[in-house]
Amino acid sequence: MKVTEIAFVGNPVTDIKRARDFYERILGLDAGEIDEEIAEGQYWIEYAIGDQTLAISNTWEPSGASGPSAALEVDDFDAAMAHLKQEGVNIILEKLETPVCFMGLITDPDGNGLTIHKRK
């Protein structure tokens, strides 16, 4: 077996309307071609981010900030973190500078961890 790429990262959510508000209005993501009810009351929504895909769905239970997370590359780290703070997003780590990047850690409304990232 040879893994050739990560097809998508999926974040489980409990309230699809609240999650969509967070991912679309606050993070500024656009729902892609896959935005559908896959079973009664169960939704699968995909957001294309560059060549990658971030999916949200209420088909499984969130594991919280201690579970796996995606790192979202932004064009302006400080502006992104200021926007998230203004929107009242839960910020776990405001800014960490490493030799190669800046990182901040946040959670979505269901407690899923997300990294805000900017390469130097």
Image (spheres, rainbow, N blue to C red):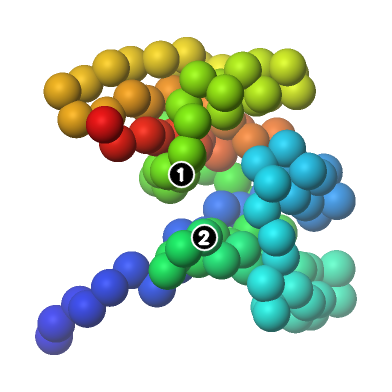
Residues at marks 1 and 2, CA–CA distance in whole angstroms: 9 Å
Q: Amino acid at mark 2?
A: Ile
Please tell me how crowded label 1 is: few (under 14), some (14-19), or many (20+) other residues with Cα within 10 Å: some
Please tell me how crowded label 2 is: few (under 14), some (14-19), or many (20+) other residues with Cα within 10 Å: few
Query: Between residues 38 and 7, which one lies in front from this camera angle?
Result: 7
55 with respect to 31 (left or right): left
Residue at (67% x, 72% y) in the render: 32
**Which residue is disc 1 drawn over?**
72
Q: Picture coordinates of residue 41 (x, y %)?
A: 85, 68
Q: Amino acid at mark 1?
A: Leu
Q: Which mark is residue 49?
A: 2
Residues at discs 1 and 2 in contact (Cβ within 8 Å) = yes
Query: Between residues 68 and 5, which one lies in front from this camera angle?
Result: 5
| Residue 15 in sight from this viewpoint | no
Q: Residue furthest bottom?
A: 1
Q: Picture coordinates of residue 57 (x, y %)?
A: 67, 61
